[in-house]
Image: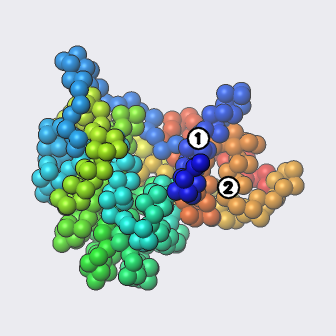
Amino acid sequence: MISKRAQKLQPSATLKVTGKAKELARAGKSIVSLSAGEPDFNTPYHICKAAITAIEDGFHGYTMNTGTPELREAICAKLKRDNELEYDPSQIVCSNGAKQSVGFSILALIDPGDEVIIPAPYWVSYPEMVRLAEGEPVIVRTDFENEFKITPEQLRSAITERTKAIILCSPSNPTGTCYTKDELKALAEVLKEHPQVCIISDEIYEYITFGNKHVSILNAAPELKDRTILINGFSKGFAMTGWRLGYLAAPTEVASAVSKIQSQETSAPSSISQKAGEAAYTGNLDEVNSMRKEFEKRRDYVIGEIAGIEGVKCFTPGGAFYVFPDISYYIGRKKPNGDTIRSSTDLSLYLLEDHGLAVVPGDAFGEPNGLRMSYAASIQDLKEAMKRLNAGLKALN
């Protein structure tokens, strides 16, 4: 009964871990969860107020499939203001979250058998989205020593005549890595040799960078604009996860193709969410900046605690709200009951079931030696989480 396409898909590992943690919590177990990629802040008030006003004013109907003209104009103004990029509203497609924008972009680009290069560690949904489009994900495993960034040499080696796209995510989920302008320029030099390769640049964590301003690949290589799709949204930087609002900025041909797909699959996002998004981009960024400063404090705390744990290595990420430590030192160790930890999945299940700490195994992201831990949690929860992590790892022998 079930299609082969659906049978091939794997469920989201992050949602699976989060669900298991909630199940244990409902059963009465004390759980500290660092599994979800969700800010623990409320959406800024001026954004909520815009939504309330929209409801009170009766802005309740369907909007244009690609989003309201006002929101798309606000997005274009934001791209010019923050990213020094020029787009026309006709090149913007608003969606029910950046995740949908990525998925529909892949559907618009990929034919059966086309290859898509995905550096690992990767966000869990990228390979599955490619498979759903009947494409072939080409996973390129990157190195901890290089902060999990794909190198020009790795990129060049991965490209074949069947390569149709590469997916880049900076700041990165799951590692927090941020590419520099020079690093993006070096990758762009390789991509210029292969004009058939499109770039899907996921920049959803743009507003959460520490020390350095976010750099888009189009800041490094504006000449690639005619084959680059920028993905962004409101969920992370504005703490608007439940509002389900994202968008893409793309060449007109791609935007038109995505618009057709969206018109048949979902149509436009919520009218109320769109008014909220408009307020987010036309209002001030004071609360965004405050959230970023708090994330930076939490990052520094978590990095400091991890540094004191025997055998665990972790670089300081430049953005997002994740750390991705190397825990290979503990693979092969034994739990107190004598069972062997054979993978990062085993380790994460052990930490959850025996110590009440929910983290996501690196296996889910294509990097078996890692764990993803979100520090989008209160400092009190982070302190308890680090205590449980330390106790759990010390108990292995």
Residue 133, given in percent of the width and then of the height, sits at 42, 60
**Quadrant of res 200:** bottom left
> Disc number at residue 18?
1
Residue 248, given in percent of the width and then of the height, sits at 27, 52
Q: What element carries label 2?
A: helix
Residue 357, given in percent of the width and then of the height, sits at 66, 42
**Along the horizontal axis of the image, is 387 left or right of 119?**
right
Pick whichever of labels 2 and 1 is earlier in the sequence: 1
**Quadrant of res 110:** bottom left
271 over 174 or under it: above or below: above
**Residue located 71% across and 28% down the image:** 27
Can you see residue 284?
no
Q: Nearer the viewer, residue 331 or 225?
A: 225
**Residue located 62% across and 34% down the image:** 22
Can you see residue 194?
yes
- Looking at this rendering, what residue extends furthest in the right direction? 338
Q: Quadrant of the C terminus?
A: bottom right
Q: What element carries label 1?
A: helix
**Residue located 56% across and 64% down the image:** 366
Q: Mark 2 points at which residue?
A: 345
**Along the horizontal axis of the image, is 176 left or right of 182?**
right
Look at label 1 and name its amino acid: Thr
Look at label 2 and name its amino acid: Thr
**Residue located 30% across and 32% down the image:** 270
